[in-house]
Amino acid sequence: MEIRTDILLGDSKKVLRTLPDDSVDLIFTSPPYADQRKNTYGGIHPDRYVDWFLPISEELKRVLRPSGTFILNIKEKVVNGERSIYVMELILEMRRQQGWLWTEEFIWHKKNCYPGKWPNRFRDSWERLIQFNKNHHFTMYQEAVMVPMGDWSKKRLKKLSETDMLRDESKVGSGFGKNISNWLTREMAYPTNVLHLATECNNKNHSAAFPEGLPEWFIRLFTKEGDTVLDPFMGSGTTNAVAQRMKRNSIGIEILPEYCKMVENELRPVELYLLENKDSYAPTEPQLCIDLR
């Protein structure tokens, strides 16, 4: 199987316009958070964040296949002693203005979060990963991320009560229920929507790198070999490196040339070539492409 990785240099809003409609199976990205990474990307004020991101999410919706998924890793910051609401506002406007479906939300628990002491809050040890889709029916390979049942099942399933042998409906009227006896012969279970992973920054030469296990989990869940993964804010190229290892095609877009060059060196392409500028590109924004096989 031939796997291709394209590394594109330029502003995501402009570069995305050159990608075909319905051509990407999974978008996994972590854009610059509001007023953070100023030394790297300049920073976007919370009051301007929604207006800045909406033209990008509009292009992301265009290039995503109808059966595809968009995973957005983002977190609110604290402003004047309270959490900013720009992420909530972004979710609402993506739904209202662009028709995105807010399908699910995952939590990344950072197992090695920074220690510290604050006057009115505790350590921030998690980030959200928001799932958006174009349609209610989308591709999902749940069996690919199943986990072992665990030792708890040996004791819990050793002796079942009469209630355990029947479907026990939720007492809050949610419509959910469980039949414990269905788990007697199972060795694997579906995971929760909380992922426990340590951060990885020092060895990535990037101020906001996430661990390889993060994109890997979502790539397993929403794609198969030969599908295409897009990261419109590539950074250190973690998503593309993982996609390549997992035999997925990928596209990475990055505005800073030094990070493009770093990813080029780390991925060790078989062939590196420069594409001619297209009409949709500004003259100062050439496209770099790595062809990996």
Image (cartoon, helix red, strand yellow):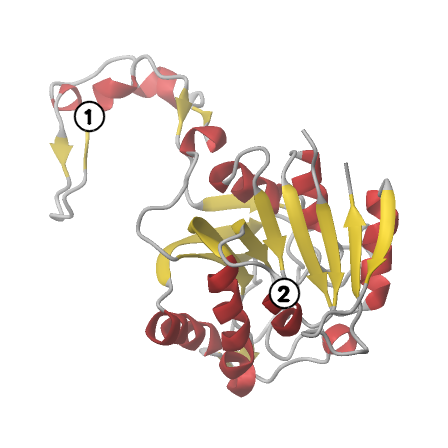
Residue in front for this viewpoint, 31 or 207: 31
Specify few, some or many for label 2: CA neighbours under 10 Å numbering under 14, 14-19, or 20 or more.
some
Q: Position of residue 114 (x, y in %)?
A: 67, 59
* Residue 92 coordinates in the image, percent (x, y): 36, 73
Left or right: 109 in relation to 231: left
User: On residue 81, which mark appears?
Assistant: none
Q: Secondary structure at mark 1?
A: loop
Amino acid at dot 1: Asn
Residue under the point 55% across and 71% down: 56
First in residue order: circle 1 vs circle 2 = 2
Residue denoted by label 1: 179
Q: Which numbered mark, 1 or 2, is in the foreground of this view?
A: 2
Name the image quarter holding residue 242: top right
Image quadrant in which the C terminus is located:
top right
Q: Which residue is disc 2 drawn over?
A: 18
Residue drawn at 14 percent across, 43 percent down: 175
Looking at the rendered image, the quarter that the N terminus falls into is top right
Q: Position of residue 238 (x, y in %)?
A: 71, 49
Q: Is residue 212 visible to us here?
A: yes
Rendered view: 188 above or below 175: above
Asked which secondary structure carries label 2, the reply is helix
Q: Residue at x 66, y 63 (%)?
A: 233
Work out whether residue 200 or residue 233 is closer to the camera in this orientation and state it.
233
C-alpha span from label 1 to label 2: 51 Å
> Which class describes the residues within 10 Å of circle 1: few (<14), some (14-19), or many (20+)?
few
- Residue 210 visible in this rendered orientation of the protein: no
- In the image, 101 versus 161, the foreground residue is 101
Identify the residue shown where x is 41% and y is 39%: 140
Kind of residue at badge 2: Thr
